[in-house]
Image (cartoon, grey):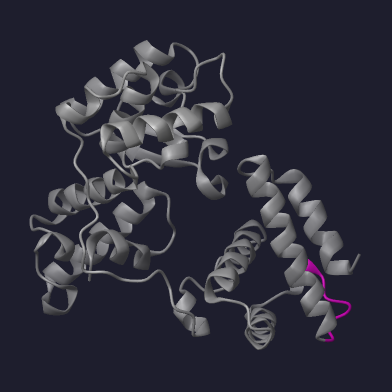
Amino acid sequence: MTPLQWDIQKLLRVNRDGSRTTQYQRKMMAFRFAKDIHGLGYRDLRLPGIGNRHVNKAVDRWKQQGLSDATIMNRLSAIRWLGHKIGKPNLGYDNNRAFGLNGRSQTSVNKARRLTVSVTRKVADPYIRVGFKVQAAFGLRRSEAMKIQPRWADRGTKLVLKGSWTKGGRPREIPIRTAYQRGVLEEAKRVAGNGSLIPSHKSYKRHLHTWEHETRKAGLSKTHGLRHAYAQTRYYELTGWKSPMHGGPSRDTLIGYKRELDIQARRQIAEELGHSRITITYVYLGR
């Protein structure tokens, strides 16, 4: 084990963010980075000493090895996590384009899906039916809409998500703004009781299988479109105009206070969706 891997292992032992799968994948990617840095000649490097010059070297090596942009970006996410834990939030930068990587493909097709009564009526399982509603009302990921414990998460004016429920182990808060959200949350609390939106007699994996079956039956395809719809609704609330993906003006045409309002809205929406980079909103809102 290299000195850097040793430091990383100690850090991981006291920072168990996310699911066991997330923790394992993060460890493998961080260890890969440490091993490659060691192979590039930085044999005595310790965790406090890593900087973006080392990250750049590693990325160059991965490109030479022919790794895909997606694989490299996954490794960079683990490096950014390390940076936040050691007080270096700029480690790995905040944009994959800084490394010449192509981010998520941009599309002009609006993937937003609105949850209708006709759709929810097709769902027999009460946990999944209200899970759809929670996902739509708060812009949650599918796994978050299953793992959430509604009674614990309800803090009056905000919904609080534990890191163990979220992707990447990032806890976050989502404002409770509307009567619809309040109604959905109360329904979720009645269904879940003091637990989560996974029935107590079922595992996450088994409930996920049921969720996927109910999704197909309801004709909803992938429920990620509900997050897109949430983001576009929030953008309209925060700016007063539709997002580019929903037929509104592109960012390039906005000037003055409108440009600033666009940036502030995108930053807020990115946080509510559980992302740290404003550029991720291009996928949901367009640009």
Label the magenta part by its dominant secondary structure. Answer: loop
Residue at the location (26% across, 23% down)? Answer: 184
Relative vertical location of residue 130 with respect to residue 86 in this rendering, above or below: above
Left or right position of 12 against 2? left
Q: Quadrant of the N terminus?
A: bottom right
Residue situated in front as seen by the camera: 32 or 174? 32
- Residue 138: x and y, percent? 30, 37
Is residue 45 covered in magenta? yes
Residue situated in front as seen by the camera: 42 or 190? 190
Left or right position of 191 against 133? right
Is residue 148 covered in magenta? no
Residue at the location (37% across, 18% down)? Answer: 125
- Residue 123: x and y, percent? 30, 23
Residue at the location (56% across, 45% down)? Answer: 169
- Residue 270: x and y, percent? 35, 55
Q: Which residues are magenta?
A: 41-47
